Amino acid sequence: MDLRYFDVVDATWPPYAITRTGPWLIREGRGGGKRVSAASAAGMAKANDIPQAIEAMRALGQHDLFMLRPVDDALDQALADQGYKVIDPVHIYTCDPTQVGAEDIPAVTCFETKTALAIMQEIWTEGGIGPDRLAVMARAKGPKTYLLGRTQDRAAGTAFVAIHDGVAMLHALEVLETFRGKGLGRYLMRAAARWAARQGAAELALLVTRKNVPANALYASLGMSVVGSYHYRIKENAE
């Protein structure tokens, strides 16, 4: 797979800080979730390099958490041998934004904003996306937008999109549970694609856990393709 997508993730959903420590990238997440808190190999990290990463993560008050890409097979096995279990396997989807954005969006359904409105924050909070993840969105540099989705005469969904290196990446798509299955997620995806195309992005990409069956079905139905994957490893007692 094209490893540049991992650079796009770090740029569009940025940790508080990324530090190079030996053959590792150490992410300081400050409560922003696994994506901004996991260590990953920056070079040929080997089994005897693992303690260095653990020490750096613990110095930040973070769990021992590693992100493994398809090129990290040997490291993946070394972590497995040391008792780290797989958690949250993730698919990377991508598409041509002009194709996804070509379909209709009903009037007064999707809106773009420059900041996270209070109603967006309420929707995200209900979905478990709190202030620490909102801080991640605020840190993203370059072109970005917040999307608000409406259905049945009320705000019911939201998402965040940012661009790096010609790739627009959508994050934190959330629709209130009561309003799921009514097409709002699809309309928000079309709105994200239209915004990405206007910004000149060549791709619209996103990340989703493999176990999120409804989301995977939605993205596949939009014509998006899986172009890569990764997973995390964590100690049994560290979740």
Image (spheres, grey):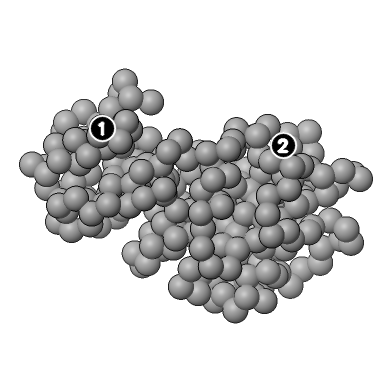
* x and y, in percent, of residue 83 in the image: 21, 28
Query: Number of marks in the image?
Result: 2
Is any part of residue 94 visible from this angle?
A: no
Q: Judging from the image, what secondary structure is the residue with disc 1 in? A: helix
Q: Which residue lies furthest to the top in this view?
A: 237
Give the left or right position of residue 212, taking residue 15 as reference: right
According to the picture, the residue beneath numbered tag 1 turns out to be 58
Q: Residue at x 27, y 52 (%)?
A: 19
Q: Nearer the viewer, residue 222 or 39?
A: 39
Where is the C terminus found, in terms of image quarters? top left
How many angstroms separate mark 2 from mark 1 (CA)?
32 Å
Which disc, if any, is residue 122? 2
Q: Judging from the image, what secondary structure is the residue with disc 2 in? A: helix
Q: What residue type is labelled 2?
A: Glu
Q: Where on the picture, by quarter, is residue 43?
A: bottom left
Give the left or right position of residue 171, taking residue 191 as reference: left
